Image: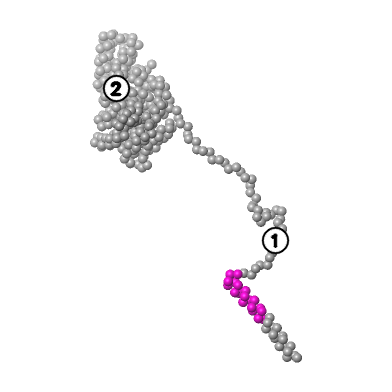
Amino acid sequence: MDLWLWIVIAVVLVAVVAGLVGNRVGASRRRRAGGAPAAPPVAEAPPSPESPSPTATAPQAPAVEPEVAEAEVAPELERPEPVAGRLVRLRGRLARSGSPLGARLLAVLSRDHLTEDDWDELEETLLLADVGAGPTGEIVEALRTRVRVEGVKDAAAVRELLRSELLAIVDPTLDRSLATERHPGPDGSEVPAVVLVVGVNGTGKTTTIGKLSRVLVAEGRSVVLGAADTFRAAAADQLETWGSRVGVPTVRSDRDGADPAAVAFDAVRRGRTEGVDVVVVDTAGRLQNKAGLMDELGKITRVITKEAPLTEVLLVLDATTGQNGLTQARVFGEVAGVTGIVLTKLDGTARGGIVVAVQRELGVPVKLVGLGEGPDDLAPFDPEAFVDGLLGD
C-alpha cells in the first residue's frame, strides 16, 4: 500500500513538472514568432473634467481672422510739368546765371564816348562768355556801325540795340523742333520716331534722356527707352528709374558689355511692335579715337534703320566746359550726323555764349537746354528768352 502511494505521488510530480516545462517552451516559441502575451485588460479611468477626452484636441486660442495680404499697389506715376510752364522759367533761370554778361555789355555801350579801350573791353567780355572769336568779331563790328550811324545813347535804346544783335547771332530762324512724330517706314507701315542720343560721360547724357522722356510724356507721346550704353553698369539702372516714374518702359540687356547695337535694335523693334510714338536710345559716352567711335555708332545706326529710320541724333554738351566742348562737338558732328544739340548745366555758368559757338561749329541748332537739377528742368530752347535772360531785366 505504501508503495502504491509513492508511485501516485511520483506520477503527479512528473505531470506538474512536464506542464511547467511545456508552458515555458510555448512562450519561448511565441516570442521568436513575434507574438506577445496579451496584457490583461486595464480598466479605463473616467475622464477628469479638467482633462481632455482621448479624442479631443488640445484647447486652442480663439481663431484669428488671417490678415489678407494687400495687393501690391503700383506707385503712382508722376505728372511731368507742362512744357509751356518751363518756357516761362527759362528766362528767369538764364537771367540769374547770365546777367553778369548782359550787365557788362550794357555798361560799356552806355558810356558817352566809346574809345578803342571800350570796344576792346566789349570784345573781351564776349570772348569770356564763350561766344567764340568769329561771332564776337561780327557782333562788335555790327555794334560799332550802328552806334556810329544811329548815335545811340539812351540806356533802353542801347539795350534794344544789343538785344537785336545777340538775337541775330543766335539765329531765331533755325528749326528747333524735335522730330517725334510717327511716320511711314520703308515698307509703308507707320513706325516710331527714333532719337539717338550721343555725348561723352559727365555731360549728363543719361539724365538728359530721362528728362527728355518726361518732356515727351508731357506732350502726350508714348515712349520706349533703349539702354544701349552697356559699358557703364549704372546707366541702364539709372535710365530704368527715370522711365518708371512716368510709366515709360526701358529695354536693356541682362549683362554688362552686351552688344549696344543689339539692345538698340530690340528697343526699336519693341517700339514698332507696340505702336509707340518715340524710341529714345542711349549710347556709350566714351570719346574714343574717331575710327572706333565711327565703327560703334555706325553699327548702331545700321542696325536700327533695319526697323525704322533715325529722326534725330542729339548731342549732349555740358555748357560749363565752354570752348573745350567744341572739340567733342566737332568729333561727334563728323561721326554721328548730329541734328540737334542739348546744352546741360546752362544755369551753372554765365558763359551762355557757348550756344552761339556750338551752333556755328556744327551748323545745327541748340534744341534743348538743361537749367537745373530738377526732373523737369529741361526745356526747349527759345532764342528770345535766352537773349533776354543774358541781358537780365
Q: Nearer the viewer, mark 1 or mark 2?
A: 1
Asked where in the image residue 316 lies, by quadrant, the reply is top left
Residues at marks 1 and 2, CA–CA distance in whole angstroms: 106 Å
**The stretch drawn in magenta includes residue 348:** no
Look at mark 1 in the image and give the residue it sits on.
44
Residue nearest the observer in this picture, 38 or 235: 38
Would residue 142 be visible to someone looking at this image? Answer: yes
- What secondary structure is found at the residue carrying circle 2? helix
Q: Quadrant of residue 116?
A: top left
Percent coordinates x, y for residue 352 in the rendering: 33, 23
Q: Is residue 252 left or right of residue 124?
A: right
Q: Residue drawn 51% across and 38% down?
A: 71
Relative to 132, say whether 301 is above or below: below
Q: Which residue does the numbered mark 2 point to in the structure image?
A: 356
Callout 1 amino acid: Glu
Residue drawn 39% across the image and 30% down it:
222
The residue type indicated by label 2 comes to Val
Q: Nearer the viewer, residue 216 or 393?
A: 216
Which region shows up in magenta? 17-35
Quarter containing the N terminus: bottom right
Mark 1 vs 2, N-terminal side: 1
Q: Main secondary structure of the magenta part?
A: helix
